[in-house]
Amino acid sequence: MHGWIILDKPLGLGSTQGVSAVKRCLRQGGYGKGIKVGHGGTLDPLATGVLPIAVGEATKLAGRMLDSDKVYDFTIRFGEQTSTLDAEGEVVAESDVRPTRAALEAVLPRFTGPIDQVPPAYSALKIDGERAYDLARAGEDVVLASRAVTIHSLHSSPSLMGRGTALEERGGGAGTLATAPGAGAPPLHHPSDGPPPQAELGEDLLEEITLTAHVSKGTYIRSLARDIALALGTVGHVTMLRRIKAGPFTLAPAISLDKLNEMGQARTLEQILLPLRAGLDDIPALALDPDQAGALRQGRVLVGIAVDDGQYFAMLGENPVALVEALDGNVRVVRGFNLD
C-alpha cells in the first residue's frame, strides 16, 4: 500500500482526523498496523474538499505537497467581519455598505499576482512558540507580520454567484462602515488605487459572492476575503470554503468518508489508491537501468547523465526508485523509495 487516497473532506473534520480515518480503515481491512499515513496539506475543519492522504512511501512526498499551489471556491458574505474571519467567530465589525458586481470585478485585479497578506489571528502560525489561535482564544492581542504570497488567478464563479439586492430596497444610501473597538482591520494592499468604487442609483448590490482563487502555498483565503471586502469599503467574512485542487489532485478521484469506510471493510482500498507517481505528475520521469537503480538505492551519485538540470522521478521499468535532482550531469537522490 504505497500511494495516495484523496478524501473529499466533510465539514467539521480536521486534517489529522482524516489521517486517522484512513489508518482505521487500513487496520480494519487487515492491511496491517505499521503502514505510515500522513496528509498533504492542512484543511480547516470548516472547509471541505480535496485532502490528499499519503500512504506508505508516499508519505516521503507529503512535505512536497505542502509547497504546492491550491485552488479554492469560497463565499464572502458582506456586512460583518468576525474574529476568526469565518462563520465560527464572533462579529467584531459591521457595515451597511454592499458592493455592486461591477465594483467587485474592478477590485479583483488588485489581489491578483504577488501581494502582501496579514494572516488571521486564528491561525496555526506560532508566536514565541505558541499557536496564534491559542493566544487569540485566551483573549490576547495577536499581531502577525504580513507575508508575501501569490494569487495566480481570482475570479467570480458564474455557477455559484451570490445574490444581489437592489439599492432602492436598502434606502438608496451607500452605507457607513462601523468597526468595533479592537477589530484591528489591516490596511488595504493597494491604497494608492484610491477609494473604493461607489454604487450608482439602481445598481444591484451583493449580499455575498462566490469566487475561485488559484493561490500559492501559505495563502489564507480568510484573509483574502477580509481584504477584498475592505477594498470595497465594507467588511466581510467567509461562509463557504471548498478546496477543489491541491497540487496535482482534484475532486475527480476524491471519495467521501462513507465510501472510504465501505471500501475499507470490503478490502478494496487498492481500487482508490492512486500510484505514488500521481503526486509528482509535474516532473518528468527518468528511466534507469538495473545498475543505475542499484547505485541510487545505495545512495550513490550517478555521473555523466545527459539530462537537463532539475528534479526527476527515477524509475526502473514501472517501479519507482527515487525522487532525484540532476545538476551538471550528476544525479543525486532527494527521496528514496523502499518498495520491496
Image: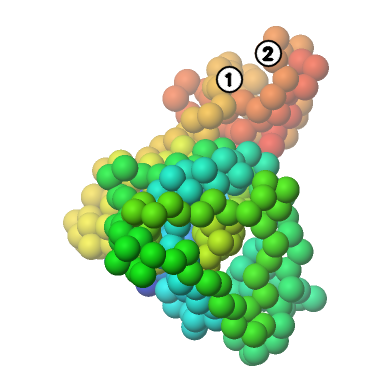
> Badge 1: few (under 14), some or many (20 or more) residues near its Cα, within 10 Å?
some
Quarter of the view holding residue 309: top right
x, y (%) of residue 33?
42, 64
Figure label count? 2
- Figure check: 182 above or below 1: below
- Figure check: 292 above or below 200: above
Question: Do residues under tags 2 and 1 come within 8 Å of each other at their CB atoms?
Answer: yes
x, y (%) of residue 96?
46, 72
Looking at the image, which is closer to me, 311 or 150? Answer: 150
Looking at the image, which is closer to me, 233 or 134? Answer: 233
> Badge 2: few (under 14), some or many (20 or more) residues near its Cα, within 10 Å?
some
The residue wearing badge 1 is 286
Q: Residue at x 23, y 62 (%)?
A: 258
- Figure check: 12 above or below 231: below
| Local secondary structure at mark 1 | strand
In the image, taking residue 336 as reference, residue 282 lies left or right, namely left
Check residue 307 in the rendering and tell me which mark sits there, or answer none: 2
Q: For residue 81, say whether it is visible.
A: no
Name the outermost residue toward the bottom.
138
Q: What sort of colour scheme is used for the picture?
A: rainbow
| Local secondary structure at mark 2 | loop
Residue kind at label 2, given as amino acid type: Val
Q: Which circle's residue, 2 or 1, is located before the other in the chain?
A: 1
Q: Residue at x 63, y 54 (%)?
A: 195
In the image, taking residue 32 as reference, residue 291 lies left or right, namely right
Residue kind at label 1, given as amino acid type: Leu
x, y (%) of residue 273?
35, 44
Real-space Cα separation, disc 2 to disc 1, in angstroms: 9 Å
